[in-house]
Image (spheres, rainbow, N blue to C red):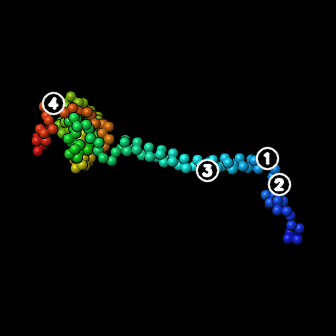
Amino acid sequence: GLRHLRPARSARRARASSRGGPPPDMGEKKQRAEKRAVQQRRRARRPVYALLGCAAAAACAYAYRQLYPLEQRCPPPDDRFHEHCVEGRKHYQIEIDWSCLGEKRTKVMRMALGLADGDSERGVGMVPTWLTEENAEIVRVSPCIRRLRLDTACRYCVPTPRPANVTNADARAAGA
C-alpha cells in the first residue's frame, strides 16, 4: 500500500535495491566483466562449431557415396568385364542355395554364370555376376535364389584379365 508515499531514493540506491542487494563493489564488477567476456568468446566460437559440423557431415556424405555410389563403377579397361559395364550391365552378388537347385539345374546355372567345373556347389554360395536390369529381375524371382544384391561400388568384382587373343574390336564383332 503506502509505497508511493515514501521519499525518492538516489538513482544508484534504487538500482542496487532493484537487484536485491547493496551497491556492487569493484570485485563484483570485475567478475561480471570476466563472465561477459567468457560468454562473448563462447558466442564467437558458435559459427566455428557450425562450420566444423557441416564439414563433418559433408565428409560423411562423401565417404558414403564412395562406399555406395549411385552409378555403377566399371572395372579398368584391360579387364574382361569392362565391356559389360560399358554396355549398361550392373554387377550383382547372387546368393544361391545350390542344394535346392538339384543336379541338372546346378549344371545349367553354372554354365549360365560362367563358373568353372571345379567350383563346389554345396549349400548356400555367393556368386558375382554382371546382369542387365531385365535379367536381374528374372534372377531375383527365380527359385533357390536367396538374395540378389547390387554391387555398384564393384567391391566384389573379381579382376579378370582380358584373353590375349581377343581384342576390343574382335569382342565387339563377336557380340554383333
Q: Position of residue 44 (x, y in %)?
A: 60, 49
Give the CA separation, mark 2 to mark 3: 29 Å
Nearer the N terminus, badge 2 or badge 4?
A: 2
Q: Are marks 2 and 4 in contact (CB under 8 Å)?
A: no
If you read the primary sequence from the N terminus, does the residue marked by circle 1 or circle 3 appear first? Answer: 1
Q: Residue at x 22, y 39 (%)?
A: 82
Residue at the outermost top position: 118
Q: Residue at x 54, y 47 (%)?
A: 48
> What is the distance, in whole Å, between disc 1 and disc 2 at their CAs?
12 Å
Q: Could you tell which of marks 1 and 4 lies nearer the N-terminus?
A: 1
Between 156 and 137, the residue placed more toward the observer is 156
Which residue is under mark 4? 164
Disc 1 residue crowd, few under 14, some 14–19, many 20+, Cα 10 Å: few
Q: Please give the residue where the numbered disc 3 appears in the rendered image.
A: 43
Q: Are marks 1 and 2 in contact (CB under 8 Å)?
A: no
Q: Name the front one of labels 4 and 3.
A: 3
Q: For the residue labelled by badge 1, is the local secondary structure a helix, a strand or a loop?
A: helix
Q: Nearer the viewer, mark 1 or mark 4?
A: 1
Mark 2, other Cα within 10 Å: few <14 / some 14–19 / many ≥20: some
- Label 4, secondary structure: give it: loop
Residue 176 in sight here? yes
Q: Is residue 151 visible?
A: no
Q: Earlier in the sequence, mark 4 or mark 3?
A: 3
Query: Circle 2 — which element?
Result: loop
Q: Amino acid at mark 1?
A: Gly
Q: Which residue is mark 1?
A: 27
Above or below — where is 5 with respect to 159?
below
Residue that label 2 marks: 23
Q: Amino acid at mark 3?
A: Arg
Residue drawn where x is 81% and y is 52% of the image: 24
